[in-house]
Image (cartoon, rainbow, N blue to C red):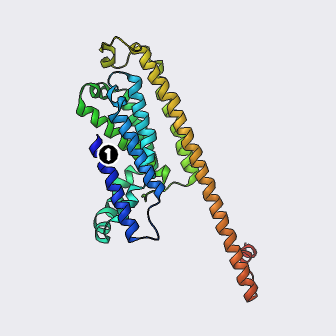
Amino acid sequence: MLLPLLAAALLYRWAARVVAREHPANPMPRWRAWAWYGGLFVLFLTLASPIGTYDTTLFSVHMVQHLLMALVAAPLLALGAPITLLLRVSSAGARRRVWLPLLHSRLMRVLSFPVVSWLLFAAVMWASHFSALFDVALDNEYAHLFEHALYLGAALLFWWPVVGADPSPWRLPHPARVGYLFLGMPQSSFLGLAIFSAPDVLYPHYATLVRPWGPTPLLDQQWAGGIMWAGGDLCFLVAMILALWVWLRAEEREGRLFDERLDRDALAATRTGRLPTADVDRQNA
């Protein structure tokens, strides 16, 4: 996985430099680049580190892998605003003929609709853990890669409307973003609780795997359920706190702009002898 991740990092760096060169007054913010690199680094940890080595040996390690991929790497990649960077680095013709029609296509309007993206993410998490796909992926490398692509794709769709860094056919207001995340927490908790409470080992791969070390398969499964329960709640809680902070920042910025408008209207009224626009609106109301 190292070469694809390195290519994604270098491609982003090249595109950001092109944008900075052509638009020096409005380059891509550096913190967005670091968010993108951070997301790629988390993917490296999940896929090419000891976490990736032992994901088919211990279910608890596999669960850490899934949490990092869906609840840490995906939002960091979304914060990198890759769609915005792609639109800015592309030519006007490519934007008009390819990227904007794709972004506003019927398929993207359906997939990016917040209710659909939320349900799709929840369905992928539940269906993958309680279907034959999970056990097949433990023994088949191609099925394993498909499972990871499914997780990452569903997670990116889930975080797209929450982060709001890229243009989208739909845009969530800040209160809805907090509610969207709040509703995501219990489904993650219940999934972890269901795995933790299962009386038997859910996956034959782990039940029949012979290893002279580590916890028993059932205890390992309980650890995995606990990691999903507690780790998922922690990730969603942090995301909600950040969403609230962004909401408050936006409200503060809007209030400051409104005050500046009142000051400009008052200054103009002083010079012309007319009432400020805000006062006229208040009288008409």
Q: Residue at x 65, y 59 (%)?
A: 252
Q: Residue at x 51, y 54 (%)?
A: 172
Q: Can residue 104 be seen by looking at this rendering?
A: no
Q: Is residue 95 above or below residue 187?
A: below
Q: Position of residue 184 (x, y in %)?
A: 51, 39
- In the image, is 157 to the left or to the right of 147? right
- In the image, is 39 to the left or to the right of 97? right
Q: In this figure, which residue is indicated by the disc labeled 1?
A: 5
Kind of residue at disc 1: Leu
- In the image, is 271 to the left or to the right of 78? right
Q: In this rendered view, identify the residue nearer to me: 14 or 88.
A: 14
Query: Quadrant location of the C terminus?
Result: bottom right
* Residue at the limit of the structure toward the top, as seen here: 212
Which quadrant would residue 169 be assigned to in this image? bottom left
Q: In this rendered view, identify the residue nearer to me: 105 or 196.
A: 196
- In the image, is 163 to the left or to the right of 175? left
Q: Position of residue 183 (x, y in %)?
A: 53, 39
Q: Position of residue 123 (x, y in %)?
A: 40, 36
Query: Quadrant location of the N terminus?
Result: top left
Q: In this rendered view, identify the residue nearer to me: 204 or 106.
A: 204
Q: Can residue 84 be seen by looking at this rendering?
A: yes
Q: Residue at x 56, y 45 (%)?
A: 179
